[in-house]
Image: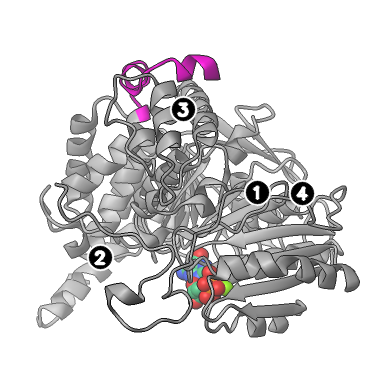
């Protein structure tokens, strides 16, 4: 089975791109399953089911979705193996720009959209910088010039990635992406011993654990203060 | 290409001097590497590592890999973009029922217009996708695309700054909050063109010629009218886009001089492909291809008779336009006008 991790800012078009790409893969007889990691709620499972893709969802609730992802991905992989998928796609929420849900040697795709603004690529951390493939969506609603400027910014942030333009509504470009996603010779049977491409956001202060009161004495653990002196 | 060792022994300042395009690359790093721009990268990276701040998402080794790759690609890119695309050729594949397409080789040459006709869902998008992906008998249609009559480099697929096709369609909008001039400057700087100021002036002039009502360089792009936006998009794509092929999905018949728009594109040596259902636009093309059941069904060269018909059609179109204007301004129609 192949495993692919797909990530990107909220509503950038991840699910749309995956579903359109899955259509092309299914025509080649490739069996696909999906898992969605999100924080509070998601309707993506319904979208996948409607598209005939078996799906599991995991909601991290109070936890950072990335941490939740890494503590659950092995079990999810086992589910995929048991279901005998050829390709398991993991879609992660990408709620903060510091997200980093990629694993070394596992293909990583970042989906980002043209509407997010040309300064967004710079603001996104490992999720974009460490991806193997960057998919840019929503090119149908902005001008050619904006598309070119946006792509140039993405390129400056991650020159090694393959950049694809995909329309999540019509699926234009999805067939092409599908040819890059599935590798017949790749077999991922276990993730044991594999490493993350980049450390995940650290989230270990009292507020991560549910603290609601404001004040110095409630701030425990990994707390850092703004420097208001420096100019 | 510089080795990693050499990069590490250089300072950001000296690298930018050698490769001016690196300004953008350094600006897009999560950490300011230009603070001590005269120190060797090796020292700067070491310092960052020693500080070991957790909140900056930065890893020296990865940075150097990316730096090296960026230089490589940008150098290749400037080399290749000087090598012009004179023509594209589509070699036949098959339609949805697996029937072979009935033509030998279909050529799209620079400065020519090809219209594409056929009902929605007939396979127009697939043809365009084949061209964008420079298909090598590896898409559902099994078509092959040649560039300048030979097998194209895979860069056309994968290099980010190098896309074969630029697109213009009616749904497109400007979403940035900039003036026309700022916007064009931004586009020009991402292309690293040498004579930006001059090109920008030409674009604004050309766009103003296309749209009826004139706009200025300091007009915010989001306040342009529909016709003005379209005119600016066309002129900008003609003069600043790096893509040799321009795909147009209809041009609305209002607020813009369509014939001039096509002239600007062909004047800039673009290969123009135009999906349309409008007979006037279709006849403005040099040839038209008819798509049916996922395949190219027919290729028709625009005949002299058709061109003559175009003149008549344009005449009656002008009359319609004039009547529309009169209607809008509340005038009564003079029968003698027709
Ligand atoms: N116009 C346009 N809309 C798109 C495109 N891609 C996706 N969309 C729309 O954008 C919205 C969000 O798409 P999703 O696929 O749900 O995005 P997502 O990244 O999976 O979102 P979350 O999982 O909720 O973070 C949907 O309404 C899509 O139809 C595109 O290329 N063009
Ligand atoms: Mg989704």
Of residues B302 and B245, the one nearer the viewer is B245
Which is more N-terminal, label 3 or label 2? 3
> Alpha-carbon distance for marks 3 and 1?
26 Å
The magenta region covers B1-22
- Give the secondary structure at mark 4: loop
Of residues A39 and B200, the one nearer the viewer is A39
In the rendering, at what x and y percent does residue B68 appear? 51, 25
Which is more N-terminal, label 1 or label 2? 1
Which is more N-terminal, label 4 or label 2? 4
Q: Is residue B226 left or right of residue B60?
A: left
User: Which residue is denoted by mark 1 in the rendering?
Assistant: B130
Residue A30 drawn above or below residue B298: below
The answer to whether the residue labelled 2 contacts the one labelled 1, judged by CB atoms less than 8 Å apart, is no
Say whether residue B115 is visible. Answer: no
Q: Mark 4: give few (<14), some (14-19) or many (20+) Cα within 10 Å.
A: some
Tell which subunit mark 1 falls on: B
> Alpha-carbon distance for marks 4 and 1?
17 Å
> Alpha-carbon distance for marks 2 and 3?
35 Å
Say whether residue B262 is visible. Answer: yes
Is label 2 or label 4 in front? 2
Q: Is residue A109 left or right of residue B331?
A: right
Which is more N-terminal, label 4 or label 3? 3
User: Which residue is denoted by mark 4 in the rendering?
Assistant: B102
Are both tags, 2 and 1, on one chain?
Answer: yes
Q: Is residue A50 magenta?
A: no
> Alpha-carbon distance for marks 2 and 1?
30 Å
Residue B74, numbered label: 3
The answer to whether the residue labelled 4 contacts the one labelled 1, judged by CB atoms less than 8 Å apart, is no
Are both tags, 2 and 3, on one chain?
Answer: yes
């Amino acid at each position: 089975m192949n495993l692919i991790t797909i990530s990107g800012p909220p509503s950038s078009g991840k699910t749309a791109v995956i579903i359109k790409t899955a259509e092309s893969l299914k025509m080649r007889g490739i069996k696909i399953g999906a898992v969605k990691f999100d924080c509070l709620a998601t309707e993506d499972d319904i979208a996948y089911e409607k598209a005939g893709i078996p799906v599991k969802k995991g909601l991290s609730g109070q936890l950072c979705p990335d941490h939740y992802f890494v503590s659950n991905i092995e079990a999810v992989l086992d589910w995929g193996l048991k279901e005998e998928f050829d390709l398991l796609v993991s879609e992660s929420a990408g709620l903060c720009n510091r997200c980093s849900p990629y694993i070394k040697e596992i293909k990583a795709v970042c989906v980002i959209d043209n509407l997010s603004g040309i300064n967004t690529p710079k603001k996104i951390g490992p999720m974009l910088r460490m991806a193997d493939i960057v998919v840019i969506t929503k090119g149908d609603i902005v001008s050619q010039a904006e598309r070119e400027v946006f792509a140039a910014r993405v390129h400056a942030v991650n020159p090694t990635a393959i950049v694809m333009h995909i329309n999540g509504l019509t699926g234009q470009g999805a067939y092409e992406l599908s040819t890059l996603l599935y590798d017949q010779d790749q077999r991922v049977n276990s993730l044991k011993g594999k490493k993350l491409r980049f450390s995940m956001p650290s989230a270990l202060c009292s507020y991560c654990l549910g603290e609601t009161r404001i004040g110095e004495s409630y701030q425990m653990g990994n707390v850092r203060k703004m420097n208001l002196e420096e100019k | 290409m510089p080795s990693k060792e050499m990069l590490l022994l250089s300072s950001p300042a000296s690298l930018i001097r050698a490769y001016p395009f690196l300004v953008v690359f350094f600006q897009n790093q999560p950490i300011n590497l230009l603070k001590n721009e005269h120190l060797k990268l090796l020292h700067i990276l070491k310092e960052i590592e020693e500080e070991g701040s957790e909140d900056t998402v930065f890893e020296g080794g990865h940075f150097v890999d990316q730096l090296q790759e960026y230089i490589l690609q940008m150098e290749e890119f400037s080399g290749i973009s000087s090598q012009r695309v004179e023509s594209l050729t589509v070699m036949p594949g098959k339609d949805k029922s697996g029937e072979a397409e009935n033509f030998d080789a279909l050529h799209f040459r620079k400065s020519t217009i090809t219209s594409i006709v056929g009902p929605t869902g007939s396979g127009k998008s697939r043809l365009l996708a084949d061209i964008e992906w420079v298909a090598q008998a590896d898409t559902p249609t099994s078509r092959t695309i040649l560039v300048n009559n030979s097998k194209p480099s895979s860069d056309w697929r994968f290099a980010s700054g190098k896309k074969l096709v630029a697109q213009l369609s009616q749904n497109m909008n400007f979403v940035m909050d900039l003036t026309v001039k700022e916007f064009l400057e931004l586009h020009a700087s991402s292309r690293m063109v040498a004579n930006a100021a001059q090109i920008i002036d030409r674009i604004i002039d050309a766009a103003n010629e296309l749209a009826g009502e004139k706009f200025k360089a300091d007009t915010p792009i989001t306040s342009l009218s529909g016709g003005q936006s379209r005119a600016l998009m066309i002129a900008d794509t003609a003069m600043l886009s790096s893509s040799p092929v321009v795909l147009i999905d209809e041009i609305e018949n209002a607020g813009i001089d369509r014939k001039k728009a096509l002239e600007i594109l062909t004047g800039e040596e673009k290969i123009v492909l135009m999906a349309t259902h409008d007979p006037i636009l279709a006849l403005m093309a040099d040839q038209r291809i008819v798509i049916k059941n996922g395949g190219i069904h027919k290729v028709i060269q625009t005949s002299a008779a058709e061109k003559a018909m175009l003149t008549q059609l344009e005449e009656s179109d002008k009359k319609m336009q004039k009547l529309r204007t009169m209607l809008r301004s509340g005038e009564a129609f003079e029968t003698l006008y027709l």
